[in-house]
Image (cartoon, rainbow, N blue to C red):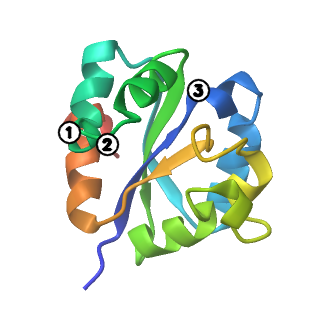
Amino acid sequence: MSGNRTFTMIKPDAVENGHIGAILEKITAAGFKIVAMKYTQLSKRDAEQFYAIHKERPFFDELVAFMTRGPIVAAILEKDNAVDDFRALIGATNPAEAAEGTIRKLYAKDIGENAIHGSDSDENAAIESAFHFAGREIF
């Protein structure tokens, strides 16, 4: 059974390009409730920990540099079938392959600067949410 919460980050490229409001509007219009949100910036250590699963990949250092170059918006979203519905809303990792109307199709530059992160499983949503938010920050 799918859970009802997922985690997202509006990435530095989308923040730099002024897309926070438009992305949040798409999220809420799709029926997601924001139960936690913060505007913050990842340290190098934070980014390395958050993306540790990719440590052995050739793009790891570039990913860490990108994710630490400016602020992000981290959020926990709530809706039935949250992970799958949110993954559909954001679109494919590569915006060139993303469906029309998805967040990445609308706001991402390329596969490296793809505007938004969305958890890929209920388990990762819980882990990623706990990484960014203390229990008292979630409503």
**Marks 1, 3: nearer the viewer:** 3
Q: Dot 2 surroundings within 10 Å: few (below 14), some, or many (20 or more)?
A: some
Q: Secondary structure at mark 1?
A: helix
Badge 1 vs badge 2, beta-carbon distance below 8 Å: yes
Q: CA distance from mark 3 to mark 2?
A: 23 Å
> Residue 12: which disc?
3
Viewer-proximal residue, 3 or 41? 41
Whether residue 133 appears in this view of the structure is no
Q: Is residue 90 found left or right of 66 in the rendered image?
A: right
> Which residue is found at the position 69% from the left and 47% from the top?
23
Badge 3 vs badge 2, beta-carbon distance below 8 Å: no
Amino acid tagged 1: Gly
Q: Secondary structure at mark 2?
A: loop
Asked if residue 39 is positioned above or below residue 88 in the image, the reply reads above
Amino acid tagged 3: Pro
> Residue 28: which disc?
none
> Which residue is found at the position 67% from the left and 34% from the top?
14
Question: What residue did someone put label 1 on?
Answer: 135
Q: Quadrant of residue 82?
A: bottom left
> Which residue is found at the position 29% from the left and 56% from the top?
125
Question: What residue did someone put label 2 on?
Answer: 138
Q: Secondary structure at mark 3?
A: helix
